[in-house]
Image (cartoon, rainbow, N blue to C red):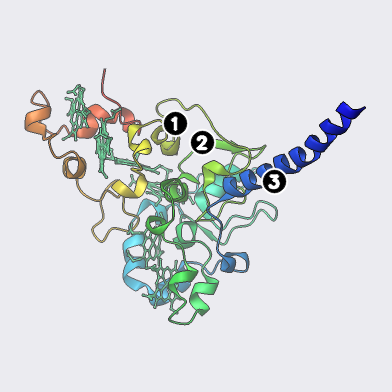
Amino acid sequence: MKKDWKLQGWLIPGLVGMLFVAIITVALAVAPALPEYMKTATYITSAKCKMCHKATFTNWSTTQHAKNADTCPWEADKAKPGTPTPEMAARYTTGYDPVAKTWAEKGTACEACHGPGSEHMKASKDERKAKIRVATQLETPAAQASVCGQCHGQFSIGDKRFAAGYKPGMDLLAMDGFKLDDVKPGTKLEQLNELVTSEHWKQGVVCTSCHLAHPDKANEHLLKAPVVELCTGCHKDKTMAAHAPTAKDGDTCATCHMPDGMHTFTEPK
Ligand code: HEC
Ligand code: HEC
Ligand code: HEC
Ligand code: HEC
Ligand code: HEC
Ligand code: HEC
């Protein structure tokens, strides 16, 4: 009996301790936390952002993201019941609500990346910056990549096949039940799956290290600079002439390191 008492004496603080650790672990898993304003902020659409951000709006208008409003793949299937699927709607609209099956705006608009903007629009001058999210200013590389990865990734979160409950600022990969699919080369909207396997990911090189969201000069893949210039900006010793003397005219770093547009950035075999 005495033994049991001793065991209990240890067991209860032990269990309390374990519970405490569990709570801390859960708290860390959902970090970085969303700011308070996000709980009440609603979607106001790009037409409102345009009133104060005219130049950015014009730049964004030239991108595939803006054009996604016209090329939503379910448009042709409008008559078919059950379309769009939630996984399509979440990737081709902004502010998708999976319960009501509605969205704020078609296409990949401002608030898909910056979060809902009502509080930002209403805010005083001093508070404005604190009431909008900018991917490049988020706490961790994973949170930064999540802004793009919410659509440019193939994954499940529990039984959902889209980023249900995600808002810019969160770490998608740390969400409860998050699991990346195994993707084959040629899969669409899969860049996150490939990037997380790379040396780049380990070193904190994320989407916005290489891509711009609304460049002032339109370019095919929204790159910060033409491919060779972009890569050699970090890999200074890897000039085409020194490192790839056998390359053909028109080849770039991507020809060998990104076959099929793959974002694994491996050394070619
Ligand atoms: C009523 C005018 C107004 C509207 C509407 C507005 N903004 Fe702004 N926004 C501003 C001003 C002014 C700033 C600059 C704040 C500063 O520099 O302190 C700003 C700054 C920003 C920034 C930069 C924040 C930073 O940290 O540098 C982003 C991103 C942004 N707005 C996005 C949006 C989006 C997205 C919308 C639509 C959902 C929107 N804005 C609607 C006035 C507006
Ligand atoms: C695909 C994601 C995405 C979309 C869509 C998007 N932005 Fe941005 N925005 C970013 C990122 C990332 C940055 C940080 C710097 C950069 O890449 O230009 C940024 C920066 C900004 C800034 C800060 C100043 C600057 O230009 O660097 C403003 C203001 C802004 N965005 C407004 C808007 C507005 C208004 C829209 C819609 C018309 C919009 N953004 C659409 C991702 C996006
Ligand atoms: C709300 C969903 C969504 C978000 C958020 C999003 N994208 Fe996209 N993006 C798309 C879709 C959908 C396409 C078009 C894919 C297709 O149908 O080919 C696309 C296309 C692109 C393209 C191809 C454009 C071209 O001309 O080759 C690039 C590059 C891109 N996105 C980069 C980004 C980056 C970087 C971010 C984060 C800053 C981001 N996206 C955030 C949905 C999104
Ligand atoms: C190290 C730089 C780098 C990083 C990091 C990066 N990309 Fe790219 N991305 C590129 C380059 C370069 C291309 C153009 C490849 C080519 O020319 O074939 C590209 C192309 C793309 C395309 C067009 C693909 C196609 O097949 O048409 C999309 C979409 C895209 N990137 C999205 C993303 C997203 C989302 C992330 C983050 C999860 C990301 N990229 C991270 C450099 C990068
Ligand atoms: C923002 C800086 C940055 C940019 C831009 C960048 N890289 Fe990297 N890259 C790194 C870092 C950091 C590493 C890891 C350490 C190292 O090998 O230098 C790395 C590693 C690599 C590796 C080695 C991978 C391995 O498995 O060992 C390859 C290949 C590579 N990068 C190719 C590219 C290509 C191609 C581009 C352009 C599309 C590019 N990088 C753009 C920073 C960058
Ligand atoms: C013709 C194909 C080819 C092209 C084009 C090419 N590479 Fe490579 N790269 C390779 C091969 C093969 C390796 C592995 C053997 C080696 O290290 O040389 C490699 C390795 C690398 C590595 C990792 C090895 C290290 O020393 O860290 C980096 C980083 C890299 N390349 C960057 C680049 C950049 C940047 C460009 C564009 C300026 C580029 N590569 C263009 C074939 C190519």
**C-alpha span from label 3 to label 2:** 33 Å
- Expressed as whole percent of the image width and height from the top left, the position of residue 176 reads 63, 42
Question: Pointer 2: residues within 10 angstroms few (<14), some, or many (20+)?
Answer: many
> Which residue position holds label 1?
187
Check whether the beta carbons of the residues at disc 1 and disc 3 lie within 8 A of each other. Answer: no
Q: Quick check: can you spot residue 81?
A: no
**C-alpha span from label 2 to label 1:** 9 Å
> Which residue position holds label 3?
20
251 vs 2, nearest the viewer = 2
Disc with the residue nearer the chain's start (2 vs 1): 2
Mark 2 or mark 1, which is nearer to you?
Answer: 2
View extreme (front): residue = 2
**C-alpha span from label 1 to label 3:** 42 Å
Inspect the image, locate mark 1, and give the three-letter code of the amino acid beneath it: Thr
> Which residue position holds label 2?
154
**In the structure shown, which secondary structural element does the residue marked by tag 2 occupy?**
loop
Q: Is mark 3 within 8 Å of ligand 4?
A: no
Inspect the image, locate mark 2, and give the three-letter code of the amino acid beneath it: Gln
- Identify the residue shown where x is 52% and y is 53%: 32
